[in-house]
Image: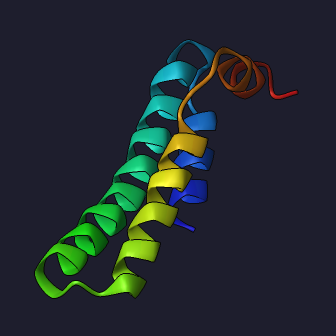
Amino acid sequence: PVFRTLLARGLAQAPEDLPAGIRTACIAQWAIVEVACFLNTLLFLFGADLLALGAAVFTWGVLIALAPTRERWDRWMTGA
């Protein structure tokens, strides 16, 4: 819900401000996932919990999947 709200707010801006709104929403989304990854990594390092390791690996995968690509950027900008 947080990402969609920020993205909708960014898309409601004037066309010349559109990249800034999208960038803001993406940074917020990546930060939320990064916090989950960081906390699970710490839980694994301090407690040797394999569930935390699995969650950390999963969130690393999500971060990689969310990485911006030229195609994704063009899709965001054109709305296609």
| Relative vertical location of residue 69 with respect to residue 35 in this rendering, above or below | above
Residue toward you, 13 or 20: 20
Please give the name of the residue rendered at 37% of the width and 84% of the height, measured from the top-left corner.
50
Please give the name of the residue rendered at 63% of the width and 35% of the height, measured from the top-left corner.
11
Going by the picture, which residue comes out furthest to the left? 46
| Relative vertical location of residue 50 with respect to residue 14 in this rendering, above or below | below
Please provide percent x and percent y for residue 8: 62, 47
Please provide percent x and percent y for residue 44: 24, 77
Please provide percent x and percent y for residue 43: 21, 80
Please give the name of the residue rendered at 65% of the width and 21% of the height, measured from the top-left corner.
73
Q: Quadrant of residue 57?
A: bottom left
Residue toward you, 11 or 28: 28
Please give left or right for residue 68 compared with residue 72 in the image: left
Residue toward you, 14 or 80: 80
Residue 12 seen from this side: no
Residue 27 seen from this side: yes
Please give the name of the residue rendered at 51% of the width and 64% of the height, measured from the top-left corner.
58
Q: How is the image coloured?
A: rainbow
Please give left or right for residue 55 compared with residue 74 in the image: left
Q: State which quarter of the image contains the C terminus.
A: top right
Residue toward you, 79 or 63: 63
Q: State which quarter of the image contains the N terminus.
A: bottom right
Q: Quadrant of residue 32?
A: bottom left
Please give left or right for residue 27 compared with residue 40 in the image: right
How many labels sit on residues? 0
